Amino acid sequence: MTMDTVATALVPHTWSFDARQRSATLAAVDGGTFDLVIVGGGINGAGVAHDAALRGLRVLLLEQRDLAFGTSSRSSKLVHGGLRYLETYQFRLVFEGTNERAALRRIAPHLVRPLMFALPVYKEDRFPLWMVDVGLWMYDGLALFKNERLHTTLRSPERMLEHEPLLNPEGLSGGIIYYDCMTDDARITLENAMAASELGSPVVTRVRVTGVDDARATDRPCTVHFVDTFSGRSYRVFSHGVVNCTGAWTDAVRQMAEVDAAVIRPTKGVHVVVKSSRLEVQYANTLTTPQDGRVFFAIPWQGRTVLGTTDTDFDGDLGEIEVSGEDVDYLLAAANHRFPTAQLTRDDVIATWAGLRPLVKPEGDVSESEIPREHQIYRDGRMTTVAGGKLTTYRRMAAETVDAAAAAAGLGVGPSKTLRHLLPGARGLDQDLNWAATDLAERSSLPEDVCRRLVGVYGVHADRVAAYVAAAPSFGDRISPDRPAIFAEVAHAVDHELAATVDDVLVRRTSVALTAEDQGSEAAERAADIMGARLDWTAAERQTHLDEFERTLNLSRAFRL
């Protein structure tokens, strides 16, 4: 029997993205053979799975926690060309970033949206306003002048303050208004994995890879061993190649395949969320900290203001990242310096998140902020590893990784096709999202703010979420009073988005834990009831999932201790 015959026999007519079918999926893949096994369900793993599946490869994606659990749900939520890389003459990185930004706008317009940025310039800054203006012309040019709009230079403090009144006027020279984009990082990861599943490639979460055998053998497939973290049952699959897309866990997976060279230097990035009423910025502000001159952002997001990020070396537990008082104080001090009337304190922080940048370890003694953000691809026998990189360029990184992995596994493939394929929520979506939201409100009788959220999060699948409310009106209740997310999304996340825990839903599917004043703690019990009824949880399992969510909240609140 040929490899293609074996793989086809393993794959049902379509792989379900229904968490209730998880056990059936595990049983179906156990002992099977695939072209590629992808380890890691962050944006790189999901992007590689989508790219490979579009090229006709049979792939299996394994993730130890949830899709986008790590760095891929803990970014600054920006899709940007990397304006600051012009300072270090990394023109290729900026060119790639700005053009990938345009590509993501085409394939996921509901998830990647234009965002106006303000770049105030102060007299003490390293570069005067005229030089920053030249840099923005270069930025627009490297984007092939395909930005939403060309930048605008504000050549006086007064004009800059008209646009962003809360800025510190002392020493202000003027500023720049320019365009980049914002995204929902967790959901763009989810939609890439969903697209791979639709193409016949199974995706399994909550499984931990425990071994990779024969990655250097040429006479037999690699063997990948993994454990279901819910049941403790062990599984194994065979593959012509293995792709390591595990971010901060990269070195640990390489060691499983007897590749000992460490290539990752993880650094921690923290963001804090405050009410927009406490710091109401008109734009996403690109600023520098007074402490060490690092770039940080003040970003309007989902009716809140996000401040971030830090950049410090990390050597702790990769799965348990606390937000410390020092992290929070650093960001609040920077924000208060640039917006002196805000006078933010720790009491103003309603949520935080912390992620690890899986940066490629540089040569010599280099500070965290100076580590290059370019990605690297390593081939070790039939294991291919991708490390480093940025969210913005994930699609391009995935294409290069599939090229390398296919060559390492001896698989013939054509060129990447992801540039021409819309992500699932964008297929058939009206480009005018405001019109689509108004139309949904008229057809569903849901509040307009809820409909705007549903269209912006789910795209064409917003109707599918609204259908739950039509069948059971109580599903239209808000998860938290101050948020437009509704309980229908909890059921939808289980039935259509592989959500297997309360943490999956309240943190990554709905962002309630990142934006609600109570971070979803009051809604957790009801969410667990909805999920438990669909997934047949025992009382003990229900409590385990509630405890896991509580641990997540405690890590984000550690700075209060």
Image (cartoon, helix red, strand yellow):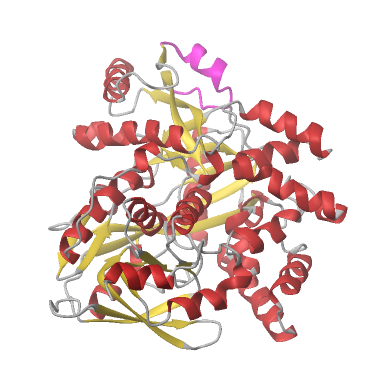
**Would you say residue 395 sits in the magenta stretch?**
no
In the rendered picture of this protein, how many numbered marks are placed on residues?
Answer: 0
Q: Quadrant of residue 438?
A: top right
Viewer-side residue, 422 vs 82? 422
Q: Is residue 159 left or right of residue 551?
A: left
Give percent across and percent down for residue 182: 49, 37
Region rendered in magenta: 155-170
Q: Is residue 297 left or right of residue 429?
A: left
Q: Is residue 220 left or right of residue 44?
A: left
Seen at 63% across and 71% down, the residue is 20
Rendered-image quadrant of the C terminus: bottom right
Seen at 41% across and 74% down, the residue is 317
Viewer-side residue, 151 vs 147? 147
Position above or below: 401 against 77 = below
Viewer-side residue, 17 vs 346? 17
Instruction: Work out which residue is located at the far right of the displayed protein and give it.
Output: 473
Seen at 45% across and 51% down, the residue is 192
Seen at 49% across and 82% down, the residue is 228
**Would you say residue 162 sits in the magenta stretch?**
yes
Instruction: Work out which residue is located at the far front of the displayed protein and give it.
Output: 1
State whether residue 314 appears in this view.
no
Position above or below: 330 against 208 = above
Q: Is residue 210 left or right of residue 349?
A: left
State whether residue 394 appears in this view.
yes
